[in-house]
Amino acid sequence: MTAPLTLCFVVGARPNFPKVAPILAALRSQPDVRCILVHTGQHYDPELSAMFFEDLGISPPDHLLGVGSGSHAQQTAQVMVAFEQRCLEDRPDAIVVLGDVNSTVACALVGAKLLIPVVHVEAGLRSGDRTMPEEINRIVTDTLSSRLYTHCYEANDNLLKEGIAADRVVMAGNVMIDTLLRLRPKAVRPEGSGLDLDSPFGLVTLHRPALVDHADSLGPMLEALAELAEDLPLLYPVHPRSRARMASFGLGGEGEGATRWRDSNLMLCPPLRYLQFLWLLDNARLVLTDSGGIQEETTVLGVPCLTIRSNTERAVTIREGTNRLVGVEPSDVLAAARTVLGQTLDPSSTAPPLWDGQSGARIADDLVEWLGRR
């Protein structure tokens, strides 16, 4: 009897969870495939992670490496040491990594050195900004990967320009949108946000170190958001790391639960479950973010999105979606937001090709067929 294929899937941070869920679900119907889920613990909160797995219908990880935080070098090295041991014990036929976090590149390096095929889901994204750690992670991971699944034509072009052979690249669509479309009907209105969610509101997410790690950038941005909140009340689910930075800079943010920032209509709350956050995304009048994935989710939901960055690796969401790149100057962000609020909301939304809820199935089918040919 032929031994089953053993596939090792790696997650390291919350954005990886909705990306891996549809692939694992599709592989349940594949005979003779064994899936191992490894959580490196790069970003790990026991309660939040458990809620995310529950919301997304993912079984708990088979292995939790417990790496935790640290510098980029420390984190990458610790993931490599712990993950190498797992690979030596589990002997996977392929390692599947997702996105662009440090765990992604660390596990790709381990796989390449152990001669285990590396598969990269969400390959080919480029911002052109190598000061971003994520950009370095993307480039290195794509170079090391034997199979690269992209979610837009631009990503294919990026890989071909970098010399990646065309027969290694497969455009499969956007797995994160699979999860969004599947769970959209189950989205849950959050309670205790401190805002009247029956009236128009905006949603904020800010987490990138370039913005939140410096008082002279974070402070003025919060001031601008508070000014905008006089026109449109804003809810900002704050990552614990960002909240700690705010407190250390004397910018507020202390306390448990939902808190009003300096008596403004900018409300801070703890991180939310996936289904709660999805409800907010779907019902927001405007989203302001520095996240990559949210640019894609708002495009499919037809919600205006302002990306508070100088560049984006998701340019497709500007050309074919509802996203607008507004830079990092607080005055520019405020002006762009007021422009959007002065416009009539267009409820129509056209998603890019293959952002149709079937990407996980396409990847599962191709992955099993490709490994069978090796």
Image: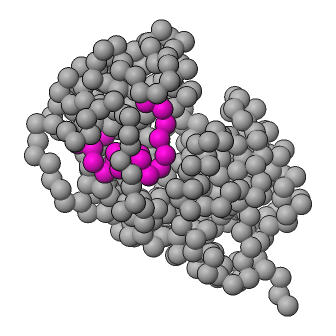
Q: Is residue 13 left or right of residue 35?
A: left
Residue 212 is at least partly visible in this image = yes
Q: Nearer the viewer, residue 161 or 94?
A: 94
Q: Nearer the viewer, residue 188 or 148?
A: 188
Question: Which residue is pictured at 47% across the width and 59% down the height?
Answer: 176
| Number of on-image labels | 0
Q: Nearer the viewer, residue 139 or 238?
A: 238
Residue 366 is at least partly visible in this image = no
Task: Residue 297 in the image: state x and y as whole percent.
Answer: 37, 53
Q: How is the image coloured?
A: one colour
Q: Nearer the viewer, residue 234 or 94?
A: 234
Q: Relative to 237, is 319 above or below?
A: below
Q: Relative to 359, is 12 above or below?
A: above
Residue at the limit of the structure toward the top, as seen here = 250
Task: Residue 53 in the image: state x and y as whole percent.
Answer: 59, 55
Q: Is residue 9 left or right of residue 360?
A: right
